[in-house]
Image (spheres, helix red, strand yellow):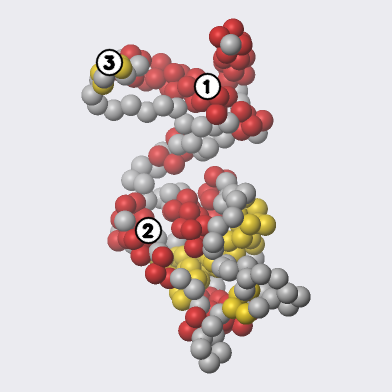
Amino acid sequence: MRIKILTVFPEMFGSVLSASILGRAREAGLITVDVMDIRPFSDRKHKNTDDYPFGGGAGMVMLAQPIRDAMAAAMGDGFRGRRIYLGPRGAKLTTEKARSLALEEELILLCGHYEGVDQRALDTCVDEEISIGDYILTGGELAAMVLTDCVARFIPGVLGSAESPEEESFSDGLLEYPQYTRPRVWEGQDVPEVLLSGDHARIRAWRRRESLKATLRFRPDLLEKADLTGEDRKILKELKETCSCES
């Protein structure tokens, strides 16, 4: 996969893209990420990319012209992919969305900044808008980093194990089960015995129950859309009754 990020602050991306899993994936050629500075595409004397909004108001608005020209350069000839604007009114980024985007050949991510982007640029240069949450950021750069990281995890080979992304939080609509590592006893606290049993069926059952338990406790809203089996619903009923008794 090839990802191009259009931004007026390219210096923000260096450490994120070169470290950890993303860095290794890029070195292995599993994903290519290019960061393009929008400023050189401005046709204004001082290469500014923003101006005051018509109608008044605080802040500045990003100009349509440099965005259009930067987008055209990023697309080149025969672009096959999605052009995405990271903005607060977009559809929320989910596991399902990230999985579908990972199937694309190319992605171009447009990072807004200041008070936003001239609507004419969005109307002509963007296929969809995506938000990473219901809160305000100073710009789309952090959101672009989050989307890139999230999508990359679904590209074969990036995590080193084909099953890894499907076993983590939200992969099946639930939160992940608790994780433990060495030592077996730490400050008087033991690792659950079942994880040391070697019985994979029992371990899977324990993990599923703990996943349901964590979701019920921390994000019960997720249960409304989760793909639950009859056994899952039975476990949830038991957990709710236990919680009710304990309270």
Report the amino acid beneath label 1: Lys
Q: Nearer the viewer, residue 133 or 207?
A: 133
Q: Nearer the viewer, residue 90 or 24?
A: 90
x 63%, y 67%: residue: 115
- Residue 245, x across and y down, in percent: 59, 7
Task: Look at discs 1 and 3 and give the one toward the viewer.
Answer: 3
Give the quadrant of the C terminus.
top right
Report the amino acid beneath label 2: Val
Report the amino acid beneath label 3: Gly
x 31%, y 56%: residue: 19
Q: Secondary structure at mark 2?
A: helix
Instruction: From this view, report whether residue 175 is shown above or below residue 150.
Output: above
Q: Which residue is mark 1?
A: 213
Q: Mark 3: give few (<14), some (14-19) or many (20+) Cα within 10 Å.
A: few
Give the quadrant of the N terminus.
bottom left
Q: CA distance from mark 1 to mark 3?
A: 23 Å
Q: Earlier in the sequence, mark 3 or mark 2?
A: 2
Q: Which residue is mark 3?
A: 188
Q: Earlier in the sequence, mark 2 or mark 1?
A: 2
Dividing the picture into quadrants, the one containing residue 23 is bottom left
